[in-house]
Image: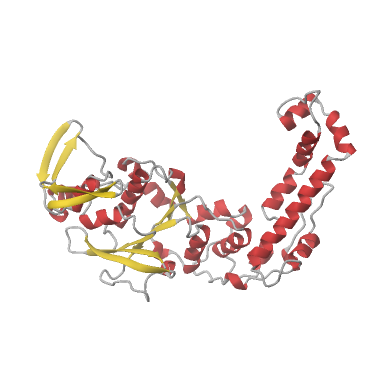
Amino acid sequence: MIYDWRSPIADVYYQQTFGPTSYQANGRAIAVNLDRRRQFQIQADQLIDFFDTQIAIEDPLLLATLKEAKTTQMSAITTTIQKEQNAIIRQQTTDHLLIDGIAGSGKTSVIFQRIAYLLYRQRKELALNEVLMISLNRLFQYYIAQVLPDLGEQTPVNLTLQQLLAQLLPSDLAALPIADQPATLTITQLTLQASDFQSLSPGLPLTIDAATSYQFFLKTPVDTPLDKRIQATQQQLTSCLQESITNEAQSADALTRLESLTETEQQRLFDRLIREDEPLAPLARKMIRHDYQDLADQLSGYQWLAFDQIIARQTPIDAVIAAQIYAYLTHHVFPNVKQVFIDEVQDYHASTLSLFKQLFPKHSSRFSVISIKVLPRIKYNSNNYPPFFHNYKLRHCAQVTAHPVQSRRYLVSYSPI
C-alpha cells in the first residue's frame, strides 16, 4: 500500500523516532511501533537502490541528491525531509510562522512542502485561490514554477509586490515608483481637505460634484477615525444615487421611453423581449440603473476622492505609501486569502510589511514568512525579531541541521498576543 507523503501516517516516517511512537489522525493519537525506515530510489519502473536509514543527515539518498547537478528550477525533495523540517511543514498549532535560517539552508523548500501539505490536509477548508505567495521578483516566480506540481499540488497565485499593487490600486497609482527607503506612514495622522474631493461628471441628470461630497464628509463626526468618515460619506453618496434612480424610474418619461424601445434595445438591456402583460416598473428601474452604471462604478471605486492630491502631500511619493492610504480609506483588503507566504521577508521595508498586514486581516489570514539570518546563531527575542511580528509573541524555536556541512538553521513560529 502506498500513502501520500502528506498523510497522517507518513508523519511517523518523517518523525524518525524508532520504537513506540504515534501520529495524529481524526483528532486522536494513534500509537504505533516504528521498526524500520527504508528509502527506495526508483527510476520509471526500475528499482535502482534502497537504504535503511536512522537519521536524515546520514541518509545515502540525501547525500546523493545533494550531489546532483542543479537546474534552473527548484527540485522537490520529499524523500529528504528531516525531523525538524517535518515539524514545521506539519505545524498547525500556531497561526503565524517565521522560517528563519542562513542562505542555502532549505527554507524555501520547506515552505513549498508546507503549502502542499496544507492544501492536502485542509482541502475541505482551503482552496487553491485562497493561498497567496508573494515573491521578490519574476525570476523567482519562474524558478519555482514546477515545485508544487512535483509535490502533488497546483501552484497557487504567486505575485510580486508590483503585481500585488497593480491588483489593488488604480493604474495611475500602481505606476508610482517603489522607493528604496520609503517613509513610514502614520495612518492615523492622515487628514483631508477640500481639494481632496473631485466631481463625478458622466453627463447624466444627476451630478455628484466635489462640493457635495465634501459637504457630506464635513457632516460626519470629527472625532471618528478618518476611514470611518469616508465610509459614511460613501454611504450617503450611494443613497443619493439610489434615490435618483428610483425617482427617475417612476417618472412618466421613463415609462414612455420603455414602451418605445426597439427589440434590439430590449435584448441589449434585458437579454430578452418585454412581454405584453409584464409589469413595467421593474424594467424601468433596470433601464435607468443601466443608464447610471458608469456613475455607479465611479462611485464604488471612490473616484470622488482625489487620491493623487492626497498622496502628493506625502514625502517621498511612493507606491507602497499610496497603497496604504488607498486601502485605509477604501477598506480594500483581500479577506478571502487564508494563507499568505512571503519569501525573503528581510528585504522588505517596514512600510511594506505594514501594508501586508493591512491587506490581509489577522482575523482571516495566516502568515508564513521566510527570512535569511545573517548570523546563523542569533536567536530572536521580543527585542530583535522582525518588525512584521511586532504584535506577535514567540511560541517555538528549533535548531535544524542543514546540509552535510555543519551549518545550522532556526525555525521560529509566532502566534498572536
Residue 47 visible in the picture: yes
Which residue is at the front of the view, 166 or 294?
A: 294
Which residue is at the front of the view, 402 or 130?
A: 130
Quadrant for the C terminus in the image: bottom left
The image's colouring method is secondary structure
The answer to which image quadrant residue 217 occupies is bottom right
Residue shown at 89% from the left, 37% from the top: 253
The answer to which image quadrant residue 267 occupies is top right
In the rendered structure, the answer to whether residue 61 lies left or right of residue 290 reads left
Residue 273 in the image, given as x and y percentages of width and height: 75, 24
In the rendered structure, the answer to whether residue 236 lies left or right of residue 73 reads right
Residue shown at 16% from the left, 40% from the top: 41
Residue shown at 33% from the left, 53% from the top: 111
The answer to which image quadrant residue 82 occupies is bottom left
Name, please, the residue furthest toward the front: 28
In the rendered structure, the answer to whether residue 272 lies left or right of residue 181 reads right
In the rendered structure, the answer to whether residue 89 lies left or right of residue 311 reads left
Examine the rendered structure and indicate whether residue 55 appears above or below residue 124: below
Residue 336 in the image, given as x and y percentages of width and height: 50, 50
Examine the rendered structure and indicate whether residue 147 appears above or below residue 393: above
Name, please, the residue furthest toward the top: 276
Residue 66 visible in the picture: no
Residue 409 in the image, given as x and y percentages of width and height: 25, 63
Which residue is at the front of the view, 46 or 298?
A: 298
**How many circles with numbers are drawn on the protein?**
0
Residue shown at 44% from the left, 64% from the top: 348
Quadrant for the N terminus in the image: top left
Residue 304 in the image, given as x and y percentages of width and height: 72, 57
